[in-house]
Amino acid sequence: MDKKEAIREGKTALGIELGSTRIKGVLIDDSGKVLAVGIHDWENEYVDNIWTYSLENIHEGVRNCYRSLRKSVKEQYGITLEKIGSMGISAMMHGYMALDKEGNQIAPFQTWRNTNTQEAADELTELFAFNIPLRWSVAHLYQRILDGEEHVRNLDFVSTLSGYIHWKLTGRKVLGIGDAAGMFPIDSENLDYDETMVKKFDRLIEKYSYDWKLRDIFPKVMAAGEQAGVLTEEGALFLDETGSLHAGIPLCPPEGDAGTGMTATNSVAPRTGNVSAGTSTFAMIVLEKQLSKVYREIDMVATPTGFPCAMSHANNGTSDLNAWVGLFGEFAELMGYPADKGELFEKLYTNSLSGDADCGGLLSYGYYSGENITMINEGRLAFLRTAESRFNLANFMRSHLYTSLGAMKMGLEILMEQEQVVVERIMGHGGFFQTKGVGQRYLAAAVEAPVTVMNTASEGGAWGIAILAAYLVGKRDGEKLEDYLDQRIFGTLSGETIFPYTEDVEGFRIFMERYKAGLEIEKAAICVMDWK
């Protein structure tokens, strides 16, 4: 079946992912090949000390992404997109979306970037004997309780962003197990919230006399391959105001960007791992067994099928790096040589390869917000050097690329050195790897292992959730997700593997020594730089 016929007949799957800086829709055929892409760029806002996206921007962003996709299909194939075989929604994990019984938002949406939950996260970690990161939904919920916020009494549904959009499209309050693992601890045996911890939480809040318990307001947990509802008539009009899109499309469970990243890199089986590097940077390592003890730096989450997974999640990735590239773009325009944004990234990234392996003594921190792994609850952006540092453009860019991996690297050190976790392959995806051979080479130095980037890496989690949607309708009886990916998706795809350079490994180690020592400077900056 050719591409045009596949689209006309609805032999397709659509994945839409709401990322930190871009909402992306990817339409694929049943073999995973990309047929069309839709894009909507956006940015979070810092309002009343909260990192958030308004409901208006969320709704319009999803619709505009679909408009872009619909336009792409029309321009490429000359047909109107009406039928889709299956769909899936994904979004940045964690956070707090709160609705009342009428489905109205009753508190500002709080993203994963917020670190205003320290008291709640500490108390819950002690109660559960399980690490509860600051950005998890249950930490946000309990902090709202501790802060005495009135809206908590009227809660009817608390979810992540993916679960919210899925509810808008299907009317169902469900969540994929990978995303649910960023709301509350998961029991990988029973593929559900950990019941012992659920009961502990309900007992903890009894004194507040709410008319709900945790399971009443949290979404139902579902695993990959289960049908999580169908696109309703109302949902179809929400997505496509032209009325062209047919209702009745089956949807897979909504997932978080960690789960779609694992899918997009074929890293859902034990001993596999992937690094997603963009606005945030995180490594996901699928475990053969649970960790020996609780680490506040490590999230214990789950794959889309429920395998236990250790996550080293850094809130801050390439945001500061992107801002510097934008500054160089302004300079180029000022000099009368305006440059394409993509070309700027490629030139600057590639030039960094000519820098010193240890960045010439330069050090930077792209801390737009607090950083869980380094135990710093506020962000300050910093670039540091001594008079003896080798200050040139290549080293400058290299230091910002290295630091995008710095906090994540500290989490990985715990897994590899203290827990002796074995990883047979590391896959990379996200904007960090878009310039061929640069980010991939630096990650190989950071993890001291070969890193593979597939030719689909630039499509990221939107492609991953499209694959999960395709798996929903295309799997054979009893076919596991890892087998489906191995044999029916990745068997026909190509990628490139880079092995670590000895000098890069040593240089990255030196950079990390400075990075760890310099955290005291970052802490001091928080105390001193309190101006707006």
Image (tube, rainbow, N blue to C red):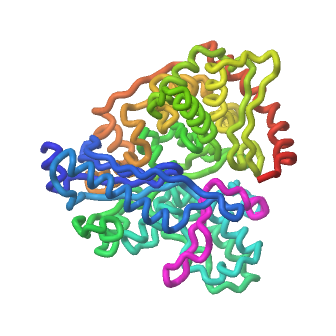
- Which portion, as a residue range, is magenta? 95-123
The percent coordinates of residue 192 (x first, y second) are: 52, 64
The answer to whether residue 526 is visible is yes
Residue at figure coordinates x 42%, y 66% from the top left: 166
Q: How many marks?
A: 0
- Horizontally, is 256 left or right of 199 in the view? left
Relative to 298, is 162 above or below? below
Percent across and percent down for residue 349 are 54, 25
Quadrant of the snapshot with the N terminus? top left
**Quadrant in which residue 128 is drawn:** bottom right
Residue 452 shows up from this direction: no
The residue depicted at 56 percent of the width and 64 percent of the height is 193
Write down the quadrant of residue 51 in the picture: bottom right
* Position in image of residue 52 (x %, y %): 60, 61
Q: Is residue 87 left or right of residue 420?
A: left
Q: Is residue 253 magenta?
A: no
Secondary structure mostly seen in magenta is loop
Q: Is residue 104 magenta?
A: yes
- The one nearer the camera, 243 or 465, is 243
Where is residue 173 shown, x and y percent of the image? 46, 72
Q: Is residue 521 left or right of residue 320?
A: right
**330 vs 301: above or below:** above
> For the point 19% across and 52% down, which residue is it?
7
Identify which residue, 276 or 472, lies in the foreground. 276
Tell me: residue 66, above or below residue 386: below
Residue at coordinates 55% horizontally, 31% vertically from top-left? 334
